[in-house]
Image: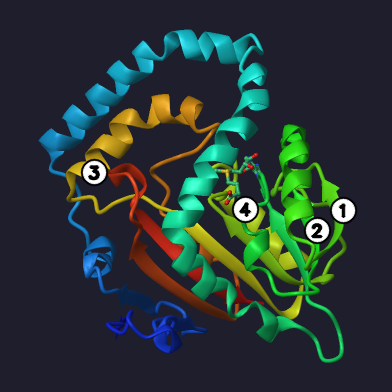
Amino acid sequence: MTLHTACRKEASPAFYFESLHRTRPAGCRVVVTGSSVRRSAVLTQPAPSDEMAVVMRFLTLVVNVLCLPLHVIHAVGLYEVYKRIFPMCLYRISKSYNKKMHDKKKELFRSLPEFTQAGGQLTLLEIGCGTGTNFEFYPRGCKVTCTDPNPHFQKYLQTSMGQNDHLAFERFVVASGEDLGSVEDGSVDAVVCTLVLCSVNNIPQTLREAHRILRPGGAFFFLEHVVADASTWTYFIQHVLQPAWHYFGDGCKLTCDTWKNVEAAGFSEVKLRHIEAPLLFLIKQHIVGYAVK
Ligand SMILES: C[S@@+](CC[C@H](N)C(=O)[O-])C[C@H]1O[C@@H](n2cnc3c(N)ncnc32)[C@H](O)[C@@H]1O
């Protein structure tokens, strides 16, 4: 069964997440058509023709071969040097990203206080927090646990913490999203992931961990860039450039259809919207929303 939920009310924030996926019968497929209209195409997208698929695979191979020196650098462990530099690059990039995505983030995180338990403070854990660019959007008094597998973010995190004294910072855990073993089951009201699921090694496992540490009724908030329609040149270029982009973006993948993982992660309700971000065409397509445990 295919359910089309049209959402053409982007101008009105109150309706921002009206295109929502509620718990649905097995086999029910939800198609959300956002104002970009693009999404209806994505979920019924025609695959590239056989000839184009062959050309795409060939060019991807060429880029892979050109990346041979990078593969070697990675294999001998020298890529670790970039892991030290990456936080500095990201600190600059995320300032510009936040400027362009300010309204989208504001609208997304406006729902956070709804998940505070009566008489308590909102407890939030961020997976892959990077430099802490989301802190300014969290509500006053929110207790924040930061996690990231890259310990070199700490310096930038501390700067962001200093700039956001409306929050109560609990701790910084150096851990990957796939293994948040030091965080108890059902212990947080909200989990946040922005531009992270494209970088993790295992999206389903990361979502399982997010689901595990959320209390029943808590929510997983996400904002992620995703693959473009299979019928577009962007899709073609995303696949061809992926081998090089992987190194430039510290493991980032341009080709994730992350919305499918979120929908399959066992949440009772998923509010998800496909948007076009005012960014480079390669990372223009985003999904944004939250999923309730
Ligand atoms: C593009 S940055 C985004 C940082 C931050 N969330 C933001 O929105 O600015 C990707 C982040 O994911 C982190 N990351 C990479 N692999 C990860 C993994 N397996 N689990 C959790 N985070 C990961 C990186 O260290 C980096 O901080």
Where does the image place residue 228, in percent across and percent down from the top left? Answer: 29, 51
Quarter of the image for the C terminus: give it.
bottom right
- Say which residue appears at 59% left-offset and 72% top-offset: 109
Callout 1 amino acid: Arg
Q: Earlier in the sequence, mark 3 or mark 4?
A: 4
Distance from mark 2 CB to nearest ligand 1 atom below 8 Å: no
Name the residue beneath numbered marker 3.
234
Residue at (53, 9) in percent of width and height: 72
Give the distance between the C-alpha atoms of the residues marked 1 and 2, in whole angstroms. Answer: 5 Å
Between residues 142 and 194, which one lies in front from this camera angle? 142
Q: Secondary structure at mark 3?
A: helix
Neighbor class of circle 1 (other Cα within 10 Å; few <14, some 14-19, many 20+) is few
Q: Which residue is mark 4?
A: 133
**Which of the two residues, 242 or 261, is positioned nearer the viewer here?**
242
- For the residues carrying marks 3 and 4, which lies nearer the camera in this image? 4
User: Residue drawn at (80%, 41%), measured in percent from left and top?
Assistant: 174
Q: Quadrant of ligand 1?
A: top right
Crowding at label 2, few (<14), some or many (≥20) Cα neighbours within 10 Å? many
Q: Secondary structure at mark 4?
A: loop
Tell me how far mark 2 sits from mark 4, CA to CA: 14 Å
Ligand 1 within 8 Å of the CB at mark 4: yes
Gap between marks 3 and 1 measured at Cα = 40 Å
Image location (x, y in percent) of residue 157? 74, 45
Name the residue carrying label 1: 171
The residue singled out by tag 2 in the image is: 145
Amino acid carrying label 4: it is Thr
Task: Indicate which disc, 2 or 4, sits on the residue closer to the N terminus.
Answer: 4
Amino acid residing under circle 2:
Thr
